[in-house]
Image: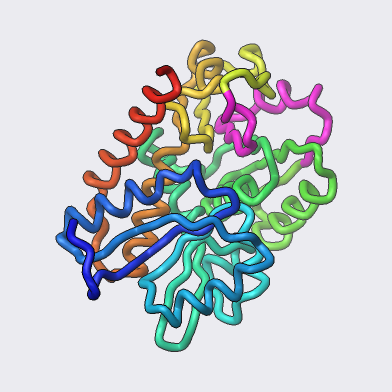
Amino acid sequence: MKIGSQTKVYAVLGHPIGHTFSPAMHNAAFAALGLDALYCAFDVAPQTLLGVLTAMREMGLGGLNLTVPLKEVAFRGLARLDASAKRLGAVNTIEFAHEGLVGHNTDGYGFLRAHEEAFGCTPKDSKVFVLGAGGAGRAVALMCAEAGAREITLGDLDVIRCHRVAGEIRDHFSACAVHVSLNTDHWPEAVQAAELIVQATPVGMKADEKPLLGAAAFHQGQRFFDLIYWFPETIHMQMARAAGATAANGLGMLLHQGARAFEIWTGQTAPLDAMRTALENELAARKSAQQG
């Protein structure tokens, strides 16, 4: 594309940021629709975020995405929050509206769309085990509860974080039973009892990491969703599939949360096919580079 004085700039901010696939996805979307726009990635430290957001608005940027560890910083610092951000307690999308900066969260939407796309159903009436109660795990657990899951078990070593998420589910979705599992020895049993298992920790991002769950934890008929998208098949996905479960990685969630952000910024329907192809090509390229 030709970059000129009228080119509208969008970006993702994180710390670090080198892992992101978002530029490939969004630049493919702009190209598919013939928009004079460019999507970049910037490393921004948490303590400078709010000042950077104000400066980027004044510079005329079109919109932003935020990734770890900036989502909670923005949630605490922005005066205007969309209902999605209030519900999930984090901001991953910034809209530069006429009235000022508005924080949105498209992660929950992205998860539900990706889940339905991968498994052909919603989490309604499901018994769910979420491994990891951090930002991503919290969003998934809350969205599963909102979607009608009948029972959710949270597995994490962080006592405070785990009980905080459990409390939020009890407060807002009383029809959903919620349990906390803080002992790793009990996780296989909780996974065995679940119909949907979501892996929301960073474990598996490195090829030599020891998995948190063994193959014996899974069985036929289960749905396993790993939020990691750097590999077509993570080590946990391999184990789940070997036991007969259906498994998906986080690429679909990345796609659909990005598509929703794109629509917030531009008011246009996101070109999903072009965005999906760009993500798949980026994944293939990075896999080839690692093997080389």
User: Compared to 100, does 184 lie above or below?
Assistant: above
**Does the magenta run of residues contain 94?**
no
Which residue does the image show at 44% across and 65% down from the upper left? 64
Q: Using residue 210 as the reference point, say whether residue 181 is left or right of it.
A: right
Q: How many marks?
A: 0
User: Compared to 137, does 26 lie above or below?
Assistant: below
Q: Using residue 230 as the reference point, say whether residue 61 is left or right of it.
A: left
Position of residue 104 measured from the top left corner of the image (x, y, whole percent): 50, 67
Give the residue furthest to the left: 34
Q: Image quadrant of residue 180?
A: top right
Say which of 69 and 222 sits in front: 69
Say which of 222 and 88 sits in front: 88
User: Compared to 292, does 263 lie above or below?
Assistant: below
Position of residue 155 measured from the top left corner of the image (x, y, whole percent): 73, 36
Which residue does the image show at 60% across and 52% down from the upper left? 15
Q: Quadrant of the C terminus?
A: top left
Magenta-highlighted residues: 180-206
Q: Quadrant of the N terminus?
A: bottom left
